[in-house]
């Protein structure tokens, strides 16, 4: 590892002079002593933690909103918009150890992507495509981006489920994971749990609307009751020691089979 004499200027300090404008730290935007403190926004927290964890040789250029890397010529070259490696995740079988990566998209939102570690070397283009697909602004070469991710020193860990449903954690706790990735537990847990391929669960209508339509017509209708009950089966599979369950409705055309299926999704 190269040694640097504390009494001499560091190469990073010299390279700063090659940037078009001075580097601005997020600390410069802190409130004055006479201003009331305010709660840090999600984006501010993301940028602060990113700057604190950036690997050596990288800087965040606040005014431009890009990360730069130190080149062999002593200049700084743009790499991409803000990005941060959050944690390493353990898969249920203990293999893989994918990375959870957060980034700021073009609309200023913080997005997260789960990236298999092996693909950083075997399929780097797939990693770059996954990140740019959700809004990362790539300004350097794809190899510059994967090199930044590989250089990130991350200690935080979590768990990755490959499907919705129940997941048993090593500490003995069991959690239920919804299709949108939300984790439900009977008691607070400290472990971070993520779902691979999580998708948003759209919400429409109100409980009152449901009660006056599907709920009212289900009274005394065994088929509709069965359809509605299917919507509550998921959390019961684990305690019942079942992987899945289904109901086969067999009847003539226009007898209500499709209506029951829609009721199950209501």
Image (cartoon, rainbow, N blue to C red):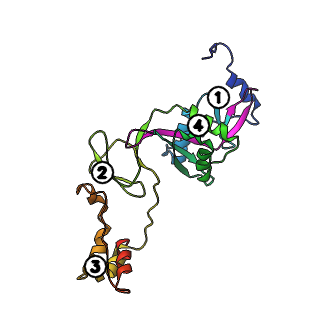
SS of the residue under disc 4 = helix
Position above or below: 4 against 96: above
Give whichever of discs 3 and 1 has the lower sequence position. 1
x, y (%) of residue 120? 57, 39
Q: Could you tell me which residue is drawn at 61 percent across and 53 percent down?
A: 133
Disc 3 vs disc 4: Cβ atoms closer than 8 Å? no
Cα distance in 3D space between marks 3 and 4: 53 Å
SS of the residue under disc 3 = helix
197 displayed left or right of 261: right
Disc 2 vs disc 4: Cβ atoms closer than 8 Å? no
The nearer-to-camera label among 3 and 1 is 3
Part of the protein shown in magenta: 69-95
Residue that badge 2 annotates? 185
Disc 3 vs disc 1: Cβ atoms closer than 8 Å? no
Cα distance in 3D space between marks 1 and 4: 21 Å
Cα distance in 3D space between marks 3 and 1: 65 Å
Is 71 magenta? The answer is yes
Residue that badge 1 annotates? 57
Q: Which mark is residue 107?
A: none
Q: Residues within 10 Å of mark 1 (few under 14, many from 20)?
A: some
Q: Which mark is residue 121?
A: 4
Cα distance in 3D space between marks 1 and 2: 42 Å
Give whichever of discs 1 and 2 has the lower sequence position. 1
- Residue 150 makes an appearance in the image: yes
Q: Residues within 10 Å of mark 2 (few under 14, many from 20)?
A: few
Nearer to the camera, 251 or 80: 251
Position above or below: 74 against 136: above
Give whichever of discs 3 and 2 has the lower sequence position. 2
x, y (%) of residue 239? 23, 55
């Amino acid at each position: 590892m190269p040694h640097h004499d504390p009494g001499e200027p560091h190469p990073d300090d010299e390279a700063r002079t090659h940037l078009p404008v001075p580097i601005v730290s997020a600390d410069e935007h802190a409130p004055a002593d006479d201003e009331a403190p305010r709660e840090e926004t999600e984006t501010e927290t993301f940028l602060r933690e990113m700057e604190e964890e950036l690997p050596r040789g990288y800087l965040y250029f606040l005014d431009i909103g890009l990360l730069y890397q130190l080149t062999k010529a002593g200049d700084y070259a743009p790499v991409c918009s803000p990005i941060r490696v959050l944690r390493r995740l353990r898969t249920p079988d203990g293999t893989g150890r994918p990375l959870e990566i957060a980034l700021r998209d073009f609309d200023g939102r913080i997005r997260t992507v789960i990236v298999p570690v092996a693909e950083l070397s075997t399929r780097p283009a797939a990693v770059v495509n996954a990140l740019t697909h959700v809004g990362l602004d790539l300004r350097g070469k794809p190899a510059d981006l994967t090199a930044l991710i590989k250089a990130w020193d991350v200690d935080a860990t979590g768990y990755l489920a490959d499907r919705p449903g129940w997941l048993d954690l090593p500490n003995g706790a069991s959690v239920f994971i919804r299709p949108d990735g939300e984790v439900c537990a009977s008691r607070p847990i400290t472990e971070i749990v993520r779902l691979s391929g999580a998708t948003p669960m759209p919400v429409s209508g109100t409980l009152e609307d449901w009660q006056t339509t599907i709920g009212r017509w289900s009274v005394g209708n065994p088929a509709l009751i069965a359809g509605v009950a299917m919507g509550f089966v998921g959390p019961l599979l684990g305690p019942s020691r079942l992987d899945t369950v289904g109901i086969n409705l067999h009847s003539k055309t226009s007898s209500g089979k499709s209506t029951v299926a829609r009721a199950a999704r209501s």
